[in-house]
Amino acid sequence: MSTLTFRNRLGELVDVPSVAATRLKNEFGAVLEEAARGAVAITRHDSPKAVLVSYDEFRALVNGRSQSLSELDGEFDALLERMQAPKAKKGVEAAFRASPAELGRAAAARTVTKTALRPVAKPARRRRR
């Protein structure tokens, strides 16, 4: 069976000890004490089925997820506000009115070469025979 690892609330990468479900059933108190120090993987037939984590680790997981969602919510609101600005609205309207050729020229003008920050030259037209 492979060793399970996870990043704990302190940011350390730690190995998670595994315990057979039968041992958990027979020695719950001892396994609970072991889990209180971090986490314990519960296995059945040498395959991990669940993880018992300490309350501190659980709180860190829950708080970490909540903060990430709050940050994303704030970023979304700021982006939406910028998109609602008059200048942004005019840009979107212009993009929808533009022909495919105009869109292509605008995209080419924004392309940057690795050697210099300048617009890329338009490709030469091929002659028809």
Image (tube, rainbow, N blue to C red):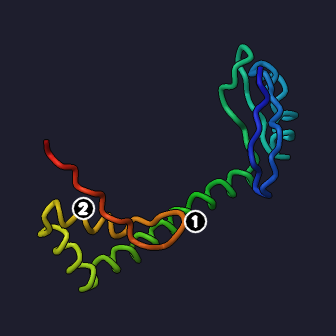
- The image shows residue 124, relative to residue 18, as above or below, that is below
Quarter of the image where the N terminus is located? top right
Q: Residue furthest top?
A: 45
Question: Which residue is rendered at x = 73% and y = 52% of the image?
Answer: 57
**Residue 128 at x, y percent in the picture:** 14, 45
Amino acid type assigned to the residue bearing label 1 in the image: Gln
**Residue 39 at x, y percent in the picture:** 78, 41
Q: Residue 104 has which mark?
A: 2
Q: Is residue 88 left or right of residue 58?
A: left
Disc 2 to disc 1: CB gap under 8 Å = no
Q: Which residue is mark 1?
A: 67
Report the front residue among 113 and 44. 113
Helix, strand or loop status at disc 2: helix
Helix, strand or loop status at disc 1: helix
Q: Residue 92 has which mark?
A: none
Per the model, the C-alpha gap separating discs 2 and 1 is 41 Å
**Residue 110 at x, y percent in the picture:** 37, 69
Amino acid type assigned to the residue bearing label 2 in the image: Gly
Q: Is residue 129 left or right of residue 76?
A: left
Q: Residue furthest front?
A: 129
Quarter of the image where the C terminus is located? top left
Q: Is residue 34 left or right of residue 108?
A: right
Question: Which residue is rendered at x = 74% and y = 43% of the image?
Answer: 6
Question: Which residue is rendered at x = 53% and y = 63% of the image?
Answer: 114
**Residue 23 at x, y percent in the picture:** 82, 22
Q: Residues within 10 Å of mark 1 (few under 14, many from 20)?
A: few
Question: Which residue is rendered at x = 16% and y = 74% of the image?
Answer: 93
Task: Give the number of the mark in front: 2 or 1.
Answer: 2
